[in-house]
Amino acid sequence: MTDRTGSHSYRATGTPSSGATVTRYDSERRGLAAGVERGRTAIDRGAEALRRAWDAVDGTVSPAGWLLLGAAVAGLGAALAWHWSEGAIVAAGAAMLLLVCVPFLLGTHTYAVELDLERDRVVAGTDLSATLEITNRGRRSSLPAVLDVPVGDGLVETQVPFLRPHASHRETLTIGAARRGIISVGPMTIGRGDPLGVLRRDHTWPGEQTIYVHPVTTSIPSTSAGLIRDLEGQVTRTIVDSDLSFHAIREYLPGDSRRHVNWKSTARTGRLMVRQYEETRRSRIAVVLDLHAGAYASDDDFEMAVSVVASLGSQAVRDGREVVVATSGEIADQDRGRIHSLTTLPTVSSRALLDAMCPLESDAHVMPLDQVASMTLQAAPELSLVFLVTGAQHAWADLRRAALSFPADVQVIVARCETGAEPSLKTAREMRIATVGMLPDLGHLLLRASV
């Protein structure tokens, strides 16, 4: 609908199947307002075009190219202003170099690039191979180019040779995974430029691949041997009316179930007597990793602590135990003491646990070990065995405070990681402290602790 003032109104009513009604009113400006509006739109479009053009030029011209361009402008200015023949020669030479480099940018990229990783999960300290295949899908031959493959914080450059139509080039890359972490591979970029490196044009293939670098683990004895021997659970000191472990016989009280009446004792005493039991808990393990940077003397100590947690957690998962792997969440400096944050890692499988441990880093803005232990007990109240994994900078009083966060019937083992230290096992009232100097010491210390 259009009126004499040029205003337009639209009214759209949805059908019953669409279930919506949309009403829109639009007006058309005239006169000076319309001119201002058109001028503003033109300026915005021009600015956007200039920005795109500048981005294209800036991405094409290298620092050497900008130097040549500056030399050409300066030489031309000197020749025109002061009639310097040297300036004209410099300007002509720089312009000639720029013109010679332009043909190397002509043409389009018709490459098909495929990167096939040998595997996407490795153990820290190992390498993996990747196969890179580049195919020229065009009808014309392609000039040599350089393919950039970002790998983590580094960059792998591959020379693409001259390729005829539908020809392929295959190359094997070796990716090093020296330390635990997550490595992102890609997106890959192929560049075409002149031999002098003055001009360059890039084409990027979107998409990234992820490599999980798992912590190193060691073989340890089964968590069900020695430390937890039973299959159904561990007997506690809590007395209940119904369970598996018989404790004693007491006199019947109102509300007791008649199923627990001991008729032999009733006949002997002449009063109703019922059985009592000790509560049994299903074996549940907690592995707590201390992320506080002040607990470790070096980065190697922290990496050993991560490997200890990975070994304990993976073994518990393989044994079919209920295991909780907990760490402190990161806390901002201004929120310390006011906000508590606990992170539990997935334990549905060893692979999921090791994946989650790849990005862990020590930090000063995390909860101390005793607070992490206390929150772990709240998250998993029925525990049988707890491992507290930390560094060598903790005092005994700090470790004791963390161990006292758990009930007396929970076994607490503290693993102190100190690279190069003599392995030892000490027993206190609330805990046992194992000093781990090398990762293979963990298995021997656990065997000693189970005796």
Image: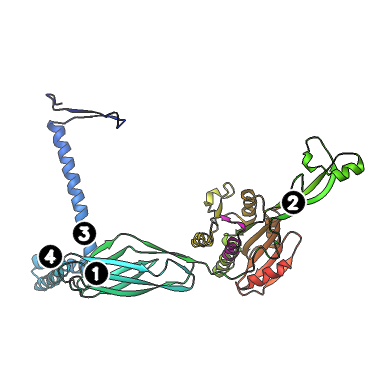
Disc 2: which residue: 244
Residue at mark 3: 56
Q: Amino acid at mark 2?
A: Leu
Element carrying mark 1:
strand
Q: Quadrant of residue 302?
A: bottom right
How far is disc 4 from disc 1 in space, using C-alphas? 47 Å
Does label 4 or label 3 sit earlier along the sequence? 3
Q: Secondary structure at mark 4?
A: helix
Among the two numbered marks 4 and 1 on one chain, the one whose residue lies closer to the N terminus: 4
Residue marked by disc 4 = 77
Numbered circle sitting on residue 135 = 1
Work out whether 329 lies above or below 141: above
Quarter holding the N terminus? top left
Q: CA distance from mark 2 to mark 3?
A: 77 Å
Residue 141: image x %, image y %? Answer: 16, 72
Front residue (pair 170, 44): 170
Whole-Å distance between the Cαs marked 4 and 2? Answer: 99 Å
* Figure quadrant of residue 443: bottom right
